[in-house]
Image (cartoon, rainbow, N blue to C red):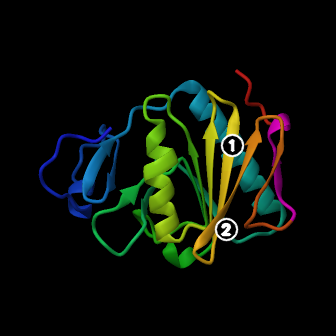
Amino acid sequence: MPRQQTTSYTEEDYYKLPENVRAELIGGQFYNMSAPGRIHQKILMELAGNIREYIKSQNGFCEVYPAPFAVKLFRDEENIVEPDISVICDKNKLTDKGCTGAPDWIIEIVSPSNPGHDYVRKLNLYMDAGVREYWIVNPMEQNILVYFFEDNHFNVRQYTFYDKVKVNIYDGFCLDFSELDLYY
């Protein structure tokens, strides 16, 4: 949910926030983030662990970062997000503060308090930034929307927590949600 604001904020303002305040900076506006719940964290850990293990088993060069991890999507000073999971395959994008530029793959786990943030605002932001693949995992509906962006258009597929979900940026990689320990 956005704070009531009349001014535009920048990266400098973002890094001046108190450590106990979680917020994202989108279009110069701060959006507060509530602390994630247990189910959210369980899903995050299962997914991040499985992705990391797959990359490691393939001697891959991509890196997996769970939130909190700052991603500055554009060269501007007005957009810094904290995706639930960021997969970055270009190590030149990694900095001491996080990532500068679009990750190759982002996963967001829907919060019951603000689903529109992931389904609309971040979808458009990630597509504009050049993210190659974006997953929206919805624990309440037990489904996954997979967006694969290429050549100024996108493909979208919907899966359930009982499906094998193809990872588009990796040939041969599927995450079998039925085998993940997601049930609460």
Report the amino acid beneath label 1. Ile
Residue closer to the observer: 6 or 66: 6
Q: CA distance from mark 1 to mark 2?
A: 22 Å
Q: Secondary structure at mark 2?
A: loop
Q: Secondary structure at mark 1?
A: strand
Which residue is label 1 attached to? 144
Report the magenta residues as a range.
172-179
Q: Residue furthest top?
A: 184
In this picture, residue 164 sits left or right of residue 5: right
State the image coordinates of residue 164 (x, y, percent, origin top left): 84, 46
Q: Which mark is residue 95?
A: none
Q: Is residue 129 left or right of residue 145?
A: left
**The magenta stretch spans residue 26:** no
The location of residue 157, given as percent across then percent down, is 72, 52
Which amino acid, mark 2? Cys
User: Is 175 colored magenta in this rendering?
Assistant: yes
Q: Kindly tell me whether residue 23 is visible in this rendering.
A: yes
Residue 62 is tagged as: 2
**Crowd around label 1: few <14 · some 14–19 · many ≥20 (10 Å):** many
Give yes or no for contact between labels 1 and 2 (Cβ–Cβ under 8 Å): no
Residue 103's place in the image compared with 21, above or below, is below
Task: Residue at 54% x, 47% y: name it.
Answer: 84
Q: Position of residue 119 (x, y in %)?
A: 52, 46
Residue 67 visible in the shown view: no
Q: Residue at x 45, y 41 (%)?
A: 116
Residue in front for this viewpoint, 182 or 65: 182
Relative to 180, does residue 61 appear above or below in the rendering?
A: below
